[in-house]
Image (cartoon, rainbow, N blue to C red):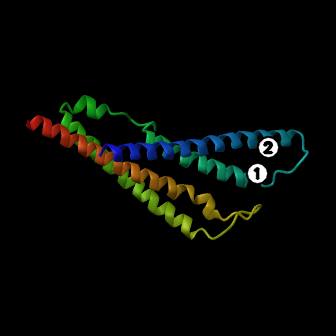
């Protein structure tokens, strides 16, 4: 069982590293493109008619892969656990509360995945300047949604296992 957990941790680390690298590259390229666009506006040496397409693609990838990375590492912003801490005093009750919240997250992310997958599959048109299929632009949505579904299920399993361990300890 310990070997399996080590494999899961290595896969988690690899997925998170890939998402972080994609996000950093997108941010870097966006910074360069926006700076170049500002420069070209003041010194008209070239035309950046393709600028909007690439910025749209980079921004979408930055936002959705970045949010998936934050979701996986549990660093995304949230209201906090003030209900679980201040209102629910029982540790098992807090575990049940976390499971319920994670199920609601799973439902939301599932709906997001369904509609983003549908949007990606139905996108038949291409961008104007580079003729990039819009499905490539939209692909970051279902991929990040699928990753969030997988990690939400993992979180639920971890919470259930933690709750079961607490109940077994209390029974002894």
Tag 1: Cα neighbours inside 10 Å, few (<14), some, or many (≥20)?
some
The front one of 124 and 22 is: 22
Question: In the rendered image of this protein, does residue 86 appear above or below residue 126?
Answer: above
- Mark 2 in CB contact with mark 1 (< 8 angstroms): yes
Q: Which residue is mark 2?
A: 37
The front one of 44 and 141 is: 141
In the rendered view of the protein, which quadrant contains the C terminus? Answer: top left
Q: Quadrant of residue 92?
A: top left
Measure the alpha-carbon separation of dots 2 and 1.
Answer: 8 Å
Q: Which residue is mark 1?
A: 51
Question: In the rendered image of this protein, does residue 28 appear above or below residue 46?
Answer: above
For image coordinates 82% across by 51% down, the residue present is: 48
The image shows residue 125 at horizontal and vertical percentages of: 66, 69
Residue 8 shows which numbered tag? none
Left or right, 26 with respect to 78, comes to right
Of the two numbered discs 2 and 1 on the same chain, state the one appearing first in sequence. 2
**SS at badge 1:** helix
The image shows residue 7 at horizontal and vertical percentages of: 40, 46
Tag 2: Cα neighbours inside 10 Å, few (<14), some, or many (≥20)?
some
């Amino acid at each position: 069982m310990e070997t399996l957990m080590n494999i899961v941790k290595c896969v988690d680390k690899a997925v998170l590293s890939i998402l972080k690298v994609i996000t950093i590259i997108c941010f870097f390229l966006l910074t360069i493109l926006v700076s170049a666009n500002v420069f070209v506006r003041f010194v008209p040496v070239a035309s950046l008619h393709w600028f909007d397409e690439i910025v749209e693609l980079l921004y979408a990838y930055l936002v959705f892969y970045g949010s998936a990375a934050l979701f996986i590492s549990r660093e995304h912003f949230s209201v906090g656990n003030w209900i679980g801490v201040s209102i629910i005093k029982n540790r098992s009750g807090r575990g049940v509360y976390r499971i319920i919240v994670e199920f609601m997250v799973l439902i939301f992310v599932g709906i997001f995945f369904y509609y983003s997958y549908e949007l990606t599959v139905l996108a038949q048109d291409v961008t104007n300047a580079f003729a990039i299929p819009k499905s490539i632009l939209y692909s970051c949505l279902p991929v990040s949604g699928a990753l969030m579904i997988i990690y939400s299920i993992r979180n639920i399993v971890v919470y259930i296992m933690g709750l079961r361990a607490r109940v077994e300890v209390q029974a002894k």
